Image (spheres, coloured by chain):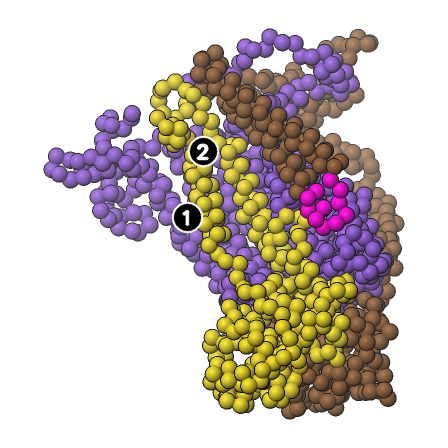
Chain colours: A yellow, B brown, C purple
Amino acid sequence: MSWINARRRRPAAGYAALLLGLVVVALVYGSLTSRGGTEASAAVGAQQDITAGKELFQANCSSCHGLEAQGTSQGPSLIGTGAAAVYFQMSTGRMPAKEVGSENERKPVTFSPRQIEDIAGYVASLGGGPEIPTPEQVSTEGADTARGSQLFSANCAQCHGFAGAGGALTYGKDAPPLTESTPTQIYTAMLTGPESMPVFSDGALSPQAKRDIIAYITQTRVEPNPGGFSLGRTGPVTEGLVIFLGGLGFLVLISMWITAKRRDPRPTGPTGTERK
Amino acid sequence: MSDMEETEGAEGTESPGAPHRVIGTPPPSPRLLGSAPVAEEHGAVALVSDSEEFAEHIDGLPPDDPEVVVHGRRAERVVAACFIIAFIAGCGFVAAYVGLGVHTVDKTLRSNLALGLSMSVTLLALGLGTLIWVRHLMPNVEATQQRHDLRSDEKERQATEAYFKEGTANSQFVKRPLVRRTLMLGTLPLLAAPVVLLRDMGPQPGTSLRHTVWSPGRRLLVQGTNRPITPAEFSAPGSMITIVPDGYEDNQDALTKAAVILIKFRPGELRIPTRHQGSTLVGTMNWTVDNIVAYSKICTHVGCPVALYEQTTHHILCPCHQSTFEATTGATVIFGPASRPLPQLPLTTDAQGYLVAKRDFTEPVGPSFWERG
Amino acid sequence: MSRPAVNSDTDFEVSKPLKGTAGWLDDRFGGARGVRTYLLRKVYPDHWSFLLGEIALYSFIILLLTGTFLSFFFVPSMTEVTYHGSYMKLDGIKMSEAYASTLRISFDVRGGLLIRQIHHWAADLFVASLMIHMLRVFFTGAYRKPREVNWLIGIGLFTLALIEGLFGYSLPDDQLSGAGLRIFEGVLQGGIPIVGTYLAYFLFGGPFPGHDIVPRMYVIHILLIPAILLALITAHIFIMFWQKHTQMPAKGNTERNVTGQPSYPYFIAKTSAWFIFIFGALALLSTFAQINPIWLYGPYSPVAISSASQPDFYMGILEGSLRVMPAWEWNFLGHTITFSVLIPFIAPLTIILGGAAVWPWFERWATGDKTFHHINDRPRNAPVRTGIGIAAVVFYGVLWIEGANDVVADKLQIPLYTVTWIARVAVIAGPIIAYFITKRICLGLQRKDRNELLHGYESGIIRQLPDGEFIEVHQPVNEERLAVIEAKKVPALLPGPGSEDDNGVPAPSARGVLGKARAAANRAFAETIPLEADGHGNGHHGNGHAVTGEEHEAVGTPGSTALPPGEGTEE
């Protein structure tokens, strides 16, 4: 009889099979789910081809935003929104939007960085607005991460969570997690206030303050969790789930084992133990 | 009745039936708490013997049965292995403590992992070994123990009541009301002492809840950068920022009431009605500058910072309990448990063009309270 | 085969030091009999649900041990300092000494983070195990005479544990717990009429946050409440020790005995293993599951707040009730009373804990049952009690989940206000529906028991009768199972309406509003499925349901699917 067959009827065999099944499912799921999000590269340079941008705009954006970006019932006017807004929306894949009116979420990018730059340049030429920051402007070298944490705490955490894990807004909207945004995307988001997010103009939050916040976000999201798995960095809700399902669940199983009837080798006789 | 006589007779003398004592011999062992009364000649219950109280029997094959012997040897080896693993892990714990330092996040992670893992393995291995020991090496004993009446028997109850009555009578507590009442009178102030002594735990609130540190001409500073701000710097519609009062940037006691949220609107969006509470003006368009409005950031529900601003809906949402305020109409409540709108801070500009407060809030900030009005 | 528990391997001498010490102590204190009766031979019953209270007890011990370690490093002061420690991301930030010392414990003390995490996980486990222990005691009726005092002590322990945990996690003065304290102060100030502002100012030593709350909470957390807890736990265990534990219905278990295993060495070994397992589970959690990462929350600032700001889970019911309430405030004569704060503060815990406290007496009043109970009820045999218990659990649970409503909205993609609206409806409708469903389930399980008793259990053996019909052979239950099923006590009916004597005078206990209410409660409590094979002859069951089908026929009746006795019933 094979090794497995000999142990098939052991009481622990069921638990072992269950554990094996869980591990296999976890491994398969983990390998199949992608990490999500494409790496949007930073703005390349200030040389934007406005003519090319206009062609791209009219081919891909004008159906909702109008041929002159003046806006239609499907999409708002882009005159005055600036290159930065275009950069943010397109480099995160939010634009072109999937549906009209719904909240736009990060999705795979359909345009190359060059094309995004060109469209941004075209929109900027229509009415001005905030520009795409240069790499120096978003560099976190020398940034005061400590001050960034205080600024983030007071202005960003209430929507995005204390560590940038995201949070709920009203009417089904949510503030996304900040795990994938590049420094330029964070900067342009603060500058232009996409969708429900308020605007943090350079007059209110200086460029240095923005760099401090970017430093805080980028540092925090790669910071290891010294206490173990982070449990989502959402706070006590997941901790409570873990103590009940994990902690108590495990202990209840152990308590059942401690008090289980013993299966000692016994002589054949009437079923059930007998008492004197 | 006869019980009382016997009890009285027994007081102060040797209990009848106890052995006559010679000097130097120890007295009979005292009654254990809860054990049945010592046998007396006057019809009390005899000490319960072990065999009446307990009964144990073992299930399973006898210990010299070859199956049991083999099983026992195997179990012994498993238990020993568990304990040896515990030993090794325990040594690992000490080694990890000595060898691994902390002081950075990465090192702390490593140290926590090493110390925690070795501690867990030690404990779980010890527990596992002990459990297998009980379940596979010790015999399968089942025992029964008798319960005794919890209630004392009637004679004991009566004896206790009788002695209590006698003692109370002897204390004259019942017979002398003057003593009794003046005793209670005398101790009464002492009971008030804890209440009195705790008075200095805190100041009386007085009118402090009605005011904040905002005063005429006090500049609005951007929290975190502590720089003042002009309307021109805050000109992008949809802007929102957290504001602290000049001079109190780090004063947590002041900020708990004085934190302000500043919002910029497009022309025509702001429609704050002129609002009074009683005779006091509490909201008006005149308190805005350039479509910039300042509301108290302290939620009127229970005081969390009401910080979530949704640019598209103009809703200010408090993340604590979801009280929602409509920013274009004077922060009126549109959902949630808050009962009052956010107070509006009257704004104007100073000579240098920076945004300053015209005066303090005209109504108390934050959660309501009994004396609020 | 069973035999007397006499071990013939006793051919060794008790070691001299041990025997000598025992003798030395006995000379001075006596108690050889007590040691034997109470420490060595005392019998402990062996059901897994009886180990839940021990989780709480051992968690408490672990809390004391880890808490002592932490108290050597924690600084309970709100004095502002500028941080220049190991956690570089906060370098230069002003924070309280309490927060700075907690960072130091986490990053500058070897094992500090581990002990901090064990302490916090143990606190969560302490409260969680208290909850399920209380539920176990409630659903098995173990709070009945003579254990009412222990039940009340238990409720006191639970209440103190809640406060102890609240103060404990608020000590580090971080952003998350500071927001919780702000809410606490707002509730005191805003919710309590007349004295609210005074209470808030006295507790906090002035306006919020002040400089006094952390040192005051520290003293309450490490001295006052642990002392009271220790005293109450000792009383709780001593009473349980003295009255002896209850036991589950089983063969050989009567109201006059306790069956299980002797203390020495069996129970002592098992409970030691249990303690070690609990400690080990906590250590495992603290190695792999990060809890309360205060360095990510940042030091407390009253101008900042995070989304997903929840207190520890045991405060969730209060948080949820604050979120579920709509706005409600009265202004009159220069005074304000805010019901949307007062009601959440007072109502949920009063309903649950107050209801639990008076429950033993309510049940006594409703059932008229004044006897001792040392055998537990199976929950199915007490449908009203179980139903009301589940209703309370649903009430608690709805508010608890509502406390996490923004996390629920975010993770499950449900609009935020919709979650609150669902909770507003469910907090009333949920318990009512749960009560009725639970009661029906219990009565259904009682019917199942009765069927098992009368018709035996399905053995899995399919048999073909000579005429070609297939039947499943039923075996009568064995003696153990029989004892469990038959351990149901039939609740007595008090005199109620219809119990008038010949002159039309109702029984004293059934008169008046209270009397009628009592009679109604009594009838509800007395609803049960009797175990006897009644109603088979005339085609009706006692509760008015008609007999349907031949499967209701008793064993031995011609045409039944069960085999007659003597044929294939015993292997």
Q: In which quarter of the image is the N terminus of chain A?
A: top left
Mark yes or no: residue A177 visible.
yes
Q: Is residue B31 above or below residue B170?
A: above
The chain letter under disc 2 is A
Q: How crowded is mark 2: few (under 14 residues within 10 Å), some or many (20 or more)?
A: few
Q: Nearer the viewer, mark 2 or mark 1?
A: 2
Residue A12 - label: 2
What residue is rendered at 50% in x and 36% in y? A256
What residue is rendered at 37% in x and 28% in y? A2
Residue A235 - label: none
Residue C442 - label: 1
Q: Describe residue C121's horizontal placement relative to residue C405 as left or right.
A: right
Mark yes or no: residue B368 visible.
no
Q: Main secondary structure of the magenta part?
A: helix
What residue is rendered at 39% in x and 48% in y? C443
Q: Is residue C137 above or below residue A44?
A: above
Q: Quadrant of residue C320?
A: bottom right
The chain letter under disc 1 is C
Q: Quadrant of residue B316?
A: bottom right
Looking at the rendering, the stretch of residues picked out in magenta corresponds to B100-112
Amino acid type shown at disc 2 = Ala
The front one of C356 and A142 is A142
Q: Describe residue C353's horizontal placement relative to residue A172 as left or right.
A: right
